[in-house]
Amino acid sequence: MKLNHTDADMEDYWERMRKGDTTAMLVLYEHNYSDLLSYGVQLSNSTDAAKDAINDVFLQLWEQHAKLKPVKNIKAYLFACIRRKIFHPAYTDNKMLLLTEKAFYESAEISYEDVLIAMQQSEETRKKVQAALEKLTARQKELIHLKYFKNMDYREIELATGISVKTAYNTIYNAVKTLANELRTMALTLLLPVLFFQ
């Protein structure tokens, strides 16, 4: 059973792990495992590769626990580690452990969640929504997933992916714009028969 730990709890467990507490490391592992697995599968298209990456990351973290830096956002840090492990398996431990926090900004963006939920009422509509999502690049899909399904803010996305907040914002904005255009066209296509046959 996954307990509801706060960010402050996670920071405390991180600090305890840095001091050699194996129980704290186990709590971090168990608390973040399902989110890391979901993210890893999305990146690698392989459950086995995602599981291996998670285990490798936690093994490296334990082996380097005395050298770890304090981290404010544990989840974003672990996402970044998983991403690097999947895309850069030879990435050096020292570089992985030296992630820094940078200034960031948050800005309002177009929400497409309500549109997706409202329009996914039939199988035909679901297929069209899937087709709209296929118009996105792999990077856009990844960032949409992090922003809207993992509820990360732009700062966390920056830490998880290594791209700047501004680039993340622009990429998500363009992805949402593409989805909005595709879904708007789909909505008009669905409404035309209703308008003409009343």
Image (tube, rainbow, N blue to C red):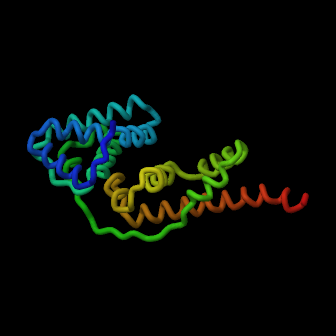
Q: In the picture shown, does residue 23 fall above or below 107?
A: above
Q: Is residue 97 toward the left or the right of residue 197 in the image? A: left
Identity of the residue drawn at 72% across and 56% down: 186
Task: Pick whichever, 125 or 81, lies toward us.
Answer: 125
Task: Pick whichever, 61 or 125, lies toward us.
Answer: 125
The quadrant of the image that shows the C terminus is bottom right
Position in image of residue 99 (x %, y %): 23, 54
Position in image of residue 143 (x %, y %): 45, 54
Mark yes or no: residue 95 visible: yes
Q: Quadrant of residue 126?
A: top right
Identity of the residue drawn at 31% across and 56% down: 159
Q: Quadrant of residue 39?
A: top left
Q: Quadrant of residue 16?
A: top left
Identity of the residue drawn at 84% across and 58% down: 194
Q: Is residue 184 toward the left or the right of residue 194 in the image? A: left
The quadrant of the image that shows the N terminus is top left
